[in-house]
Image: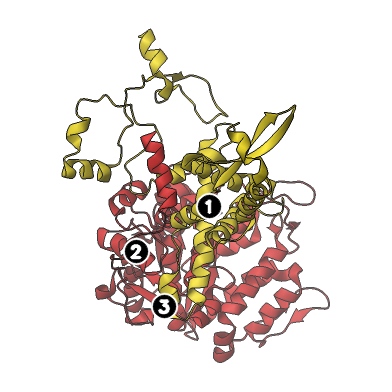
Amino acid sequence: MALFAKYLRIGSTVKHGFQAFPQLTTAKYSVYPPHFAEPVYKKQELDKLYESGEIENYKLIPFKAAKSNETCSIFHDPMVAKFINYMLLKGQKKLAREVLEKTFEKIKKLQLEKYNRETDPEKKASMIIDPVVILKKAVANSKPLLKLTAVKRGGSFYQVPVPITDKESTFYAMRWFVQCGREKDKSISFADFMATELIKASNNDGKVVNKKLDLHKQCEANRAYAHYRWS
Amino acid sequence: MRAYRRLCGYATAAVKQETQYQIPTAARTEKKNPVDHDSQDVSKFYTIDPKTVSNIFQTGGLPKPFTEQTNMFAETALMIRQPALEVINSLKSTDFQKPAVRYLLYGQTGSGKSLSLAHILHYAYSSKFILYHIPYVPIWLKYDRKEVNWSSSKNGMADIPLIAAQWLKHFVHQNGALLNELNLTTSQDYVWSQRETTPQGTTLNELVTHGINRAKYACDCMDILLNELKAHCSNNRCKMLVAIDGFNAFFNEKTDLKTEDRVKVTPQQITMVQTGLSAVLSDWNNGAIIMVTSPRAALNTKRESHLPIYLIGRQGFEHIDPFIPVMVPELSTVEFNNMLDYYEEKRWLQKPGGRKELEFLTSKLPADLMARCAPL
């Protein structure tokens, strides 16, 4: 039982008054040894595995349990779930989720206004209204290609441009969005600001894309230090 | 790691979604006048033209989320549903020489009671009823910071003059044109003060205008207006539809209101409430009375059930007895699918295919469905 309690952390701490009684939370991922595989929790993906016969490879591999926010619902999107996690403050996930939902609603409102105003049927058909697609496009547009790291050479630190992994650049892009949202003017709500920002970024414009371009410019300026990566 | 790479892939390979899916179109009827609606049109949408909407609902009557939605969709489309149709059909076949019939719409929060009432109001408006329409009672009784005075004409009663004047504006907005056409006049002299009197034979429009300009007398004006209208209806000069949304708020235990000398007033002590209660009495003919009870209009300690006897209590029940209860249920399967078709047609719902999940999450309540579909 002690082992069970250790693996499945029983959340007895009351967080911000949301949890009234002790609740079973999912296992911490660090308890799994490295040979455990990531769970496939989407039904469609599982069906694909069965169809292609790839499932045979997975049959003898132990799997981690799915996290509590990973569902096979059609409305669930891993990208959106990740974004919510980056937005989150003090573990208030419900609040973060609601704010993002409001953002999505606002995006749809703004886009539908444009859609109803548009008279050209071709442009109308090409217009994107789906907020999740806009979010993905915005993040894809603001992913940097390089980053700067501090390297100590001869007693002083140099900002050295180094290549960035896909994972890290996604993180940079999403973090920039959240940062811009927190730095915004107080007169405008987070959801409203984020909605306009995401729409702008999906059209390669706006604060976050400028941040990306600034980083690229700095990398370009510091290209002379690039060899410090090796020597 | 693999999962994370998959996640990043989502971001890089964004937007390339297949557009094979055929976007459905909602079932609609061409009949724009609710007089023509019959049982074949159930679960279909009909559009109200913007001019009528502004004539009837500009100063209240449609729920706020719905109004926002209509702005976004650039049209006001209502679904024709059984409860509203039932009331409209019985209004068509009523013998108006008999005392006014009372209907009570009730149902769960978010099941579409107010919009059913809107449909009925549209019917009444287009068949030339005078609308004595109270958009939502709790806005009278909730939220302090209103000016509440002791009434000068009725002892021990309280007035809310500004709100009453606002309501009179609402009344004129809805019925001004019709009142001019019918040319209804007052049947006796009304003395407001030493200097101000309304002589016999003034038009009702002027009476109401006086009430709006002199807000102090707005509450009395409401009462007089009702009595005049009742008398005119009984004399076969006009037809009237009394419609009260959030009716059960009349029977709440308390209000948020305080008079200037900091005395809390109960709903029964307010003159406007007494007017509303007397509007519901069927001591007149040539008209109908429609009430809507909703759990949201009750105090938040008293929302466990949506049944009228629970919400209005024994006293209220006896006040309106006998009445015809009309249950507004949740959407049927056909209506539910048509609603989602409509949302998809209007590009409001962007993810097709999750209908079973939505059905489970919202238990087919239209207001819940609207809220659920907002971020999707």
Crowdedness of circle 2 by 10 Å Cα count: few (<14), some, many (20+)? Answer: many
Chain that is yellow in the image: A
Check the image and name the residue furthest to the right.
B195
Q: Nearer the viewer, mark 1 or mark 3?
A: 3
Q: Nearer the viewer, mark 3 or mark 2?
A: 3
Mark 2, residue position = B339
B219 over B375 or under it: above or below: below
Q: Position of residue A94 (x, y in %)?
A: 51, 39
Q: Position of residue B141 (x, y in %)?
A: 62, 54
Query: Which labelled disc corresponds to residue A102?
Result: 1
> Could you say whether the residue bearing mark 1 is in a helix, strand or loop?
helix
Crowdedness of circle 3 by 10 Å Cα count: few (<14), some, many (20+)? Answer: few
Q: Amino acid at mark 2?
A: Met
Q: Quadrant of the C terminus of chain B?
A: bottom left
> Can residue B186 be seen at all in this image of the molecule?
no
> Could you say whether the residue bearing mark 3 is in a helix, strand or loop?
helix
The disc numbered 1 marks a residue on which chain? A
Give the residue displayed 48% in from the left and 57% down from the top: A134
Q: Badges 2 and 1: C-beta atoms under 8 Å apart?
A: no
Q: Nearer the viewer, mark 2 or mark 1?
A: 1
Give the residue displayed 37% in from the left and 54% down from the top: B365
> Can residue A126 be seen at all in this image of the molecule?
yes
Mark 3, residue position = A122
Chain that is red in the image: B
How far is the residue under mark 1 from the one under mark 3? 29 Å
Check the image and name the residue furthest to the top.
A2
Give the residue displayed 69% in from the left and 47% down from the top: A183
Q: Residue A106 falls in which quadrant of the image?
A: bottom right
On the rendered structure, is A53 left or right of B341?
Answer: left
The disc numbered 3 marks a residue on which chain? A
Report the coloring of the rendering: by chain
Query: Which labelled disc corresponds to residue B122?
Result: none
